[in-house]
Image: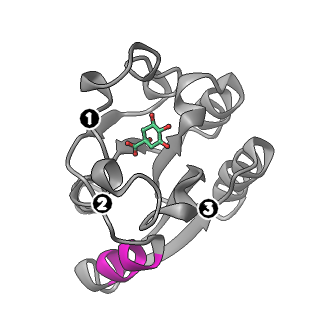
Amino acid sequence: MHFCIINGVNLNMLGTREPHIYGTETLDDLELMLREHVKDVELTFFQSNIEGEIVNCIHECYHNKIDGIVINPAAFTHYSYAIADAIKGVDIPTIEVHISNIHKREAFRQHSVTASSCIGSISGFGFSGYRLALEHLLYSNRKKDNNK
Ligand code: DQA
């Protein structure tokens, strides 16, 4: 099984960026935590501040036969129809994650244009959201394999 964790714009600054909202842990801490949590599964991590690179990464997931995607598009969530289309286009089970609870924040953050391309979304649980998303992908992929 192989999953891809994609982080969007400004998330390379986790740890120093608005720590009262996003915490003090870095993207490297996130990677370490997830790698420790899910063993014997291949994980690929990707972060970019460039919308098109995220679209390319999603296309690569298709070519590499990735089994599931966890994506935090960050601010792209609120306006990137290109990322929404890319997720729809590859038809890979994808879960959207937000560290903060976007529904409790400014009005423009409360709408996601990408979430409807995903099988579900998790918001407001900090880094645990990524872990929960991965757990679901693992569970559903194992179930699918068992039913073959
Ligand atoms: C975020 C929420 C977005 O509104 C914001 O632009 C981010 C991070 C989150 O993880 O809480 O950059 O996606």
Residue type pointed to by label 3: Gln
Residue at x 47% of width, y 16% of height? 108
Q: Which residue is mark 3?
A: 47
The colour scheme applied to this rendered structure is one colour
Indicate the position of residue 123 as horizontal and vertical percent values: 27, 38
Q: Is mark 1 within 8 Å of ligand 1?
A: yes
* Quadrant observed for ligand 1 in the rendered image: top left
Instruction: For label 1, count other residues whose C-alpha is less than 10 Å away and answer few (under 14), some (14-19) or many (20+).
Output: some
Residue at x 47% of width, y 47% of height? 72
Label 1 close to label 2 by CB (< 8 Å): no
- Label number found at residue 101: 1
Helix, strand or loop at disc 1? loop
Q: Does the rendering let one see residue 73?
A: yes
Q: Quadrant of the C terminus?
A: bottom left
* Residue 50 vs residue 17, the one in the foreground: 17
Bounds of the magenta span? 28-35
Q: Which residue is mark 2?
A: 23
Residue at x 53% of width, y 56% of height? 11
Indicate the position of residue 61 as horizontal and vertical percent values: 64, 57
Q: CA distance from mark 2 to mark 3?
A: 18 Å
Q: Is residue 98 magenta?
A: no
Query: Depth-wise, is mark 1 or mark 3 nearer the camera?
Result: 1
